[in-house]
Image (cartoon, helix red, strand yellow):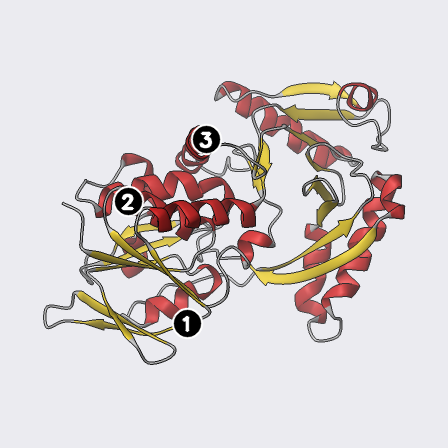
Amino acid sequence: MSPERVAVIGVGVVGACVGWNLARRGAHVVLVDAGKPGEGVSNWSFSWVNASNKTVSRGYFDLNVAGMAAHRELAGVLGADSWWHPTGHLRWADEAAAEAKLLETAELLGRWRYRVEACTGAEVRRRFEPAVSVPDAARVLFYPDEGWVHGRRLVGRLVEEAVAAGAEVRAGTAVRDIRTGAGGGVRAVVLGDGSAVDVDVVVNAAGPDASHVAGLVGRDLPMRREPGAVARVDCAEVPVRRAMHTPHIEIRPDGDASVVLHSREVDALIDAEEGARDPDEFGRLLHAVAQRVVPELAGGRLAETRVVNRPIPVDGFPSVGALPAVPGYYEAVTHSGITLGPVIGRLLAAEIHGGSGDALLAGFRPERFSR
């Protein structure tokens, strides 16, 4: 039997997927977001759907593979529209040690039956990306089953479908408090305007604010602080067709008129110089580096840059499921929310609906931080 009312706090891709799945199951869902649904980290992410970068443990890899499959299933239900782009992913390095590491990972992925193709730079320009400047003899890996997602558009579709199934949206208001009853179970959420919404269940999908929301029920959820800079460049004609990790910058299309840029090397400058630069300075740096890989981007216009904090629990892994100490409180907090949102949404909704926890989530339960 579905709970009568569920508050999902945070309406990025993860929260929207949880809410949509619960609404489809008959729960009365209240979607609460301090800003606008889909306008936070989900809109300012590289949004790369993958498992090739998730080999730190087999359990985490398997969860991400399931996330990729869940995207394909979701596209079959919602329609791909303009949010789902399963165009594959390219990756290469320009230093021997980095290249060796990429090839070692590709070998491991092959043993795990994850599809990867090796090609040369010349083949990349001929088969995939004619506008990309990559040495002819460079060793490039192509992951055909990966892709990218337009996070804001996906959230919009999920919220629209959830509302059609009876969900409410409370946007532009933060959660001030979570009330619990005599037995410690969740009873209501108090919003920024002082109004209270009676609920049986709260799902903490608040992304970078998840630690604060957890604190409202006396929960210590340790999070990393890892800010990242993402820039959008407007183009008269988008010169790339798929997501790619080049030696110093990540580039992907962002629809028909812009590209998204991100770089771990630029991210490393943020903490050291926070307050000394505005986001547009990071954007200009990203744009300059990107032009070395895709010269046509020189004609593009830097539209906007945003620095956001990634929602990463302190050990780097998701925190998903119930917290036994607080009946009715669940977490859905993770990095790579774009990849994992659809599978977390499905599994957590089933768990809230009365099912047992899925084995895919066994290593990622919230109580591991309570030991």
72 sits left or right of 193 in the view? right
Q: Nearer the viewer, mark 2 or mark 3?
A: 2
Residue 121 in view (yes/no): yes
Q: Nearer the viewer, residue 271 or 346?
A: 346
User: Which residue carries the number 3 mark?
Assistant: 65
Rendered image quadrant of residue 9: bottom left
Amino acid type, mark 2: Ala
Check contact, mark 2 vs mark 3: CB within 8 A. no
Disc 3: CA contacts within 10 A as few (<14), some (14-19) or many (>=20): many
CA distance separating discs 2 and 1: 23 Å
Disc assigned to residue 174: 1
Classify 10 Å Cα crowding around label 2: few (below 14), some (14-19), many (20 and above): many
207 left or right, relative to 298: left
Kindly identify the residue that appears in the image at 48 percent across and 58 percent down.
37
Amino acid under disc 1? Ala
Q: CA distance from mark 1 to mark 3?
A: 33 Å
Earlier in the chain: of badge 2 and badge 3, it is 3
Mark on residue 349?
2
Q: Position of residue 273 (x, y in %)?
A: 72, 70
Picture coordinates of residue 101 (x, y %)? 65, 33
